[in-house]
Image (tube, rainbow, N blue to C red):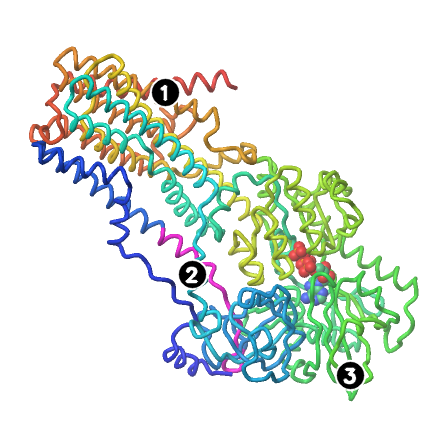
Amino acid sequence: MLTSEQAKRHQETYGFNELTEGKKKSTFVLFLEQFKDFLVIILILAAIISGFLGDMESAAVIFVVITINAILGTVQTIKAEQSLNSLKQLSAPEAKVRRDGHLMQIPSREVTIGDEVIVEAGDMVPADGKLLTCASLKVDESALTGESLSVEKSLDEVEEGAALGDQTNRVFSGGLVTYGRASFEVTAIGMQTEVGKIAGLLESTKEKRTPLQMSLDDFGRKLSIAILVFCGLLFGVMVVRGGRPMDAFLFAVALAVAAIPEALSSIVTIVLSFGTQKMAKEHAIIRKLQAVEGLGSVSIICSDKTGTLTQNKMTVEDYYVNEIRIPAEKISIEEENQKKLLWYSMLCNDSSNRNGKEIGDPTETALINLGDRLGVPAARIRQQFPRLSEIPFDSDRKLMSVSHREDEKVVMVVKGAVDVLLHRAVSIQVGTDIRPLTEEDKQKIEAQNEEFSKNGLRVLAFAYKTLKEEKDLTLQDETELTFLGLISMMDPPREESRQAVEECIRAGIKPIMITGDHKVTAAAIAKRIGILKEESEACEGAVIETMTDEELQEFVEGISVYARVSPEHKIRIVRAWQEKGNIVSMTGDGVNDAPALKQANIGVAMGITGSEVSKDAAAMVLTDDNFATIVKAIENGRNIYRNIKQSIQFLLSGNFGAILAVLYASVANLPVPFAPVHLLFINLLTDSLPAIALGLEPHTSEVMQEKPRPVGQSILNGAYLRRIGTEGLIIGGATVAAFLLGLREGGSLLGSTMAFGTLCMSRLAHGFNCKSEKPVLFTKMFFNNLFLIGAFLLGTALITAVLLLPVLQPIFKVQTLTPGQLGIVYGCALGSFLGIQVLKGIKRIFVK
Ligand code: ATP
């Protein structure tokens, strides 16, 4: 064991306990990577050649525009990376160490050589070390050895040089404790650990692309091919009509660059990374980016009760000893059996409470808090009766046992669920009398349990027996017990649970309570928060054991509370709902919950009370363990998806408008409506900025009035593409109108100037169209996105400057507009904006 002082010195000498990350790309490399797009390279080459052929201005502008674009891209990449990294830090694991003689919880990176670390079921081993104590410890070391079975550990010495898997008296960083408890002394940290030595292999596990990104990439590829074919044809037509091949080529390439929506999947990354930052602030940390998309489709939330729907602030309400119920304020340690129950409840207990800092299971903390109140600190009792052996609690068995020496006898104390414990008791202590436990006694205890449970109280039963000798406890010892008493505890529902449940139901999501607790307790709490309406909606996990998968699929429909559930039941319940075509979110905290968390579409772990193992398996971690946070996360998930969709709609419809204008001009045998510079300017100014701004649209709770998004529905469905087509048509129409007016009034340069101005302005204004499927004009919503307003104002200022300032005109290939002509440009753009708004209004009236 170290002192804090020593630990600090060791940290200075040995550094932090962390795996150094692989080499990060420098900003410069990221910047260069922005140019690796094939088309951009072609464009630069074309610009350079055209520069040599005399068009220096175009070449320079193209260069500048592309560089600015690359800078923007680099900044976005860095920002997205930073926000994802800070997310990772938020879900960094913690470890329990003993320093200065006290148990304390610290971030795993602060564990250092020589530390005494305590691990128990559910923990992740934070460093390599040699065991000091060991109580039935089993560790899953598959990450290190590939062996999927947990390794049983012991203090027995092992031969020098044994294979890792055989070093059973040592534990290794990255191992998951699946059973038991142990303490060990740290011998290696960070890159010196066994896992550190192979860290190079682990680093290559990169964040996978999300399904949405993959489908957008696929769509982007197909669209790019279509655009390239179109541009190729256009090049041919321009040359055939007598255009200079170099000009035609430059135009075709510029059009391809402007029209190909290369930003599709990077928009997703940016919106996801900013969205997940917001979610983290609202207590939901996303560990797998794919989960954000899935959240929008969640139709079932299976939630634990204790701590998630309830406050997990337990207080003892009653004792039941000597066949009578004693309210907490009347408990007296003067009476022998009440004192015994208090002592046993603190001995068969792993929690601690030092200076108000509680470490451990709140159920157990409640028991020692009562001791403190009655002037009996747990530490004193534990010192007086040191633990000899133990069988840790597990939620399958629902029992915990310990043994200690008392008056020369070895006593084993067992605590756990009432029903389980009563099965194993053969006698009962009433006063000093110990007599056989009759059916009548059992009924009386069960009736008391029922009464407690109906009031939503959690109940623990206590029993003991004297062992013949000191020995390591085994599961076979948990029989022939003497029943001592019950302790009831209150764990009030969280205040926000009721509202969150209501919101869920309104949003078409079914909330389900899955708990290890007693059915009556669970139903009472579920009723209070609105999850359960009829008693018939509650059942015990065991009833599903005999059902076939098909029967279970029928059955789950009518059930909203599952009590006395084991982790295997959880998996079957999730699977049954999934088979019925639902996206299921499931919470879990224990080590045994990991498989169910992995099976669920969105596995949710508890940040405060959850085991490291469950966090590792989860897609999302709640830093406040709160059910309402899941509902909030779903709202965020739906908003993020909506923002991505709107941002893509903006990009695609605008690009489509530009292509339509070019297509029209070439079919109508008119001059090309844009110079290459125009297209690039539009690409820079009206693509990236408003698209990102739309991705950052403020979230609304309106999304919770819709039903969950159907599973497997592609973002690019028919209605969406039709909308993009119609909006593109209107923008293209306005551009062509301005082009024709300009052409008639002053020839091709004026035509293209006005087309360029109109397309730019229409697209900037179109940002506001994409905010909602409803009309937004004259609503508060119109003004609620400052980024979008900023992008619009900046864009409008720049394009107006280009159209009016004579110095910029040779560079941008435009001619000065008269106020009247500028009015036409603004008017056409406004017309396209209003047209789309009116269309949205009409659609709303008729679709309703
Ligand atoms: P949830 O699954 O909603 O979190 P829970 O916390 O009640 O509910 P478990 O932790 O699996 O579920 O507990 C199941 C039962 O085991 C409880 O009802 C209680 O009777 C018993 N129990 C809980 N904690 C302990 C413990 N530390 N020691 C002994 N028995 C316990």
Residues at discs 1 and 3 in contact (Cβ within 8 Å): no
Residue 385, magenta (yes or no): no
Mark in front: 1 vs 2? 2
- What residue is at 55 percent from the left and 84 percent from the top? 160
- Specify the amino acid type for callout 3: Val
- Left or right of 467 on screen, residue 72: left
Which residues fall within the magenta stretch? 81-102
Q: Residue 747 location in percent, x, y?
A: 13, 14
Q: Residue 366 location in percent, x, y?
A: 65, 66
- Mark pair 1, 2: CA separation: 49 Å
Q: Nearer the viewer, residue 453 or 65?
A: 65
Q: Residue 189 location in percent, x, y?
A: 45, 75
Residue 90, magenta (yes or no): yes
Disc 2: which residue: 203
Q: Considering the numbered disc 2 on the image, is that residue within a helix, a strand or a loop? A: helix
- Labels 1 and 3: the sequence-earlier one: 3
Q: How busy is the neighbourhood of tag 2: few (under 14 within 10 Å), some, or many (20 plus)?
A: few
- Left or right of 89 on screen, residue 261: left
- Labels 1 and 2: the sequence-earlier one: 2
- Snapshot quadrant of residue 678: top left
- Specify the amino acid type for callout 2: Glu
- Mark pair 1, 3: CA separation: 83 Å
Asked whether the viewer can see residue 317, the reply is: no
Instruction: In the rendered view, tell whether residue 616 sits above or below residue 730.
Output: below
Instruction: In the rendered view, tell whether residue 831 sits above or below residue 59.
Output: above
Q: Nearer the viewer, residue 79 or 504?
A: 79
Disc 3: which residue: 410
Disc 1: which residue: 836
